[in-house]
Amino acid sequence: MKDWLLYLVPAAGLLALLFAYFKASWIHRQDAGDERMREIAGYVQEGAMAFLRREYKVLAVFVLAVAALLGGAHALGESTDANFKHPLIALSFVLGALCSALSGWFGMRVATGANVRTTAAARTGLDGALRVAFSGGTVMGMSVVGLAVVGLGVLMLLYGKLELVGSLSGVQLTHVVSIVAGFSLGASSIALFARVGGGIYTKAADVGADLVGKVEANIPEDDPRNPAVIADNVGDNVGDVAGMGADLFESYVGAIVGAMVLGAAVGSFELVILPLLLAGLGIVVSILGTFFVRTREGGNPQAALNLGTFGAGAIMIPVIFAASWWITGEIPELWWRIGLAAVAGLVAGVLVGVTTEYYCSKDRGPVAGIAKSSERGSAPNIISGFAVGMQSTALPILWIGGAIIASYEVLDPAGLGLYGIAIAALGMLCTTGIQLAVDAYGPVADNAGGLAEMSGLPKEVRERTDKLDAVGNTTAAIGKGFAIGSAALTALALFSAYRATAGVEAIDISRPSIMVGLLIGGMMPFLFSSMAINAVSRAADSMIDEVRRQFREIPGLLEGKARADYARCVDISTRAAIQKMVVPGLMAVIVPVVVGFIDKNMLGGLLAGVTVSGVLLAIFQSNAGGAWDNAKKYIEDGHHGGKGSEAHKAAVQGDTVGDPLKDTSGPSLNILIKLMSVVALVIAPLLAG
């Protein structure tokens, strides 16, 4: 028995946190620019941290209430050896929520300090600015994987010391991992609120700033005369740093826990510890990958970031095979089958990312086509964007489907087909540390450009930050593609784990109750999206009214002789985000519980419906929004009349339609489908029998 390996897991997590601390300290030592730059950056950091404080106060009430319900529900279960310690699931839930919140806090704190230092570095060269921005993202990435692995590792060790593991027999191991699954529920809950709340915040500010500033007042993006510009920069952080960080934290934890549950279902400690070990080794590989990210003046930042991401992925492949052989080498042929399943997920993730880049990059045909259609007005732009988004669902579904079949078939001869799917999901996310570093780099670079504009720095500084920002927009789209792809695989693994735990033999859609569950599940992503988009619309209305009021009532504002009231716009976004994030989040938790206690088989149909509908809708919304955004940037580069042209105004309108799709509802859907699956898994022991 290799139970001593459990100690290596939190050690790997601590390594990630130490590396994050090292990077944060290095960023803090960099030049933060002149007084004006530091003043504006201070507004952004103050607004971002104030939002997190208010959001976390609301979430603390939710976490404590759910923890009490979890502990109480399981305490009321039968007092058998299998159930009597299940109230500890509440502890797992609280720790998962806490680790997710902490990762967002650490990442946000550093990102809002790295933005101004990126601007300062851009005054002298591109490579220095890239290093600072990427280091800011690295802190986010390493905080996420470090806290996830430390949390899961500590729980396994803790419950082992409490003799929950005992002799590590199949039954005891299954109960331990079921309790640890509460960690994933905590992570998923925080992620959904953070994604929805952050998305509402950032898009309310972005839409208000663009429609009034760019279209009506005809002033540049990030112009300090625009009252919504600080809120817009704050939104980049709360949506794309804290929100995306919580998103991938949840994806990462869900993939690990899904594999652990299925490993425990066959009574194998080795198959339970392997996902944790692969995650720990992925941390080491991600740290190595960060050293590949370098460029030179006039170089291509995208190539540098791709080298780090894909280089880490290439290194991870032999590491996966080696770890599988080390853990399961005593079982003939199993190690290389597990390795192939993980590689299938990794390859699918890369293919989904490449496909996403094709549909969202401003250097590719789909975006150029949307930009061309903008010459004929807003309606053709929007129609083209919808068509691109719908078309973009085809290839990712084929890549995800191929990974599901390949990972299942390669391990099916060993009776571990479903475990293979879970390992494929983890293979896609093994190098989350550097994937998220690249993703979180984007909003840091975006903020750096805004600070350069608001501080009145020379044109060449803004050109360097714009080059970094353009790459960041594509990396964000790729990151969302990875998150959605992993969501499909993880949701399937969690769904299988729910079936095994709840004793659901098969999902027979000829049964009316299951068909109703399937239809309700298919409807959920649409209802959820409508709530999120409507929240953005209402908040944006308030933001637009406020920006117009300030332009109208503050003498000399448009002439640059007076300063805007930034705090008022920040408060509008904050209040809207906090108020509107609650109902969609509660719906995702309550619906599977209600349906499960009506009929556990009906809940199986619900999970199938929400997974299929949610994955397709998430890909469509994220890619359509990304394509609209880059079509606007393509025109701003000088095509089809450039900035201020009729085509540009149409593209701004299209980008405004796409904003809530790609940054609020779209990326939130992959959390929705996994959260509902995790809720089902957590309540499964109460439904069994």
Image (cartoon, grey):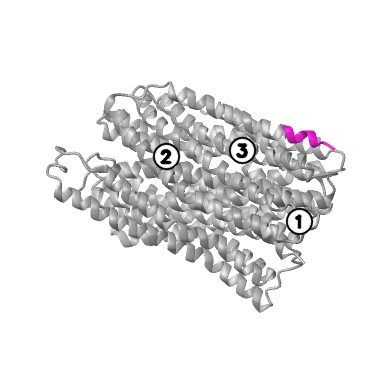
Residue denoted by label 3: 431
Q: Amino acid at mark 3?
A: Thr
Instruction: Residue at 25%, 40% (x, y): give it.
Output: 223
Bounds of the magenta segment: 1-7
Q: Which comes before the other along the chain, label 1 or label 3?
A: 1
Q: Main secondary structure of the magenta part?
A: helix
Q: Position of residue 93 (x, y in %)?
A: 62, 49
> With respect to residue 680, does 130 lie above or below?
above
Query: What residue is disc 2 on?
Result: 443
Where in the figure is residue 29, as x and y percent of width and height? 43, 21
- In this picture, residue 639 sits left or right of residue 627: left
Q: CA distance from mark 3 to mark 2?
A: 20 Å
- The amino acid type, in three-letter code, at marker 1 is Asn
**Residue 120 highlighted magenta (yes or no):** no
Q: Is residue 674 visible?
A: no
Residue denoted by label 1: 83
Give the number of the mark in front: 1 or 2: 1
Rendered residue at 25%/48% (across/down): 214
Helix, strand or loop for disc 1: loop
Quadrant holding the N terminus: top right
In this view, the residue in front, 303 or 23, is 23
Measured Cα–Cα span from mark 1 to mark 3: 36 Å
Q: Quadrant of residue 564?
A: top left
User: Residue 356 in the image: x percent, y percent?
Assistant: 51, 49
Q: Are there few (<14), some (14-19), or many (20+) residues within 10 Å of tag 2?
A: many
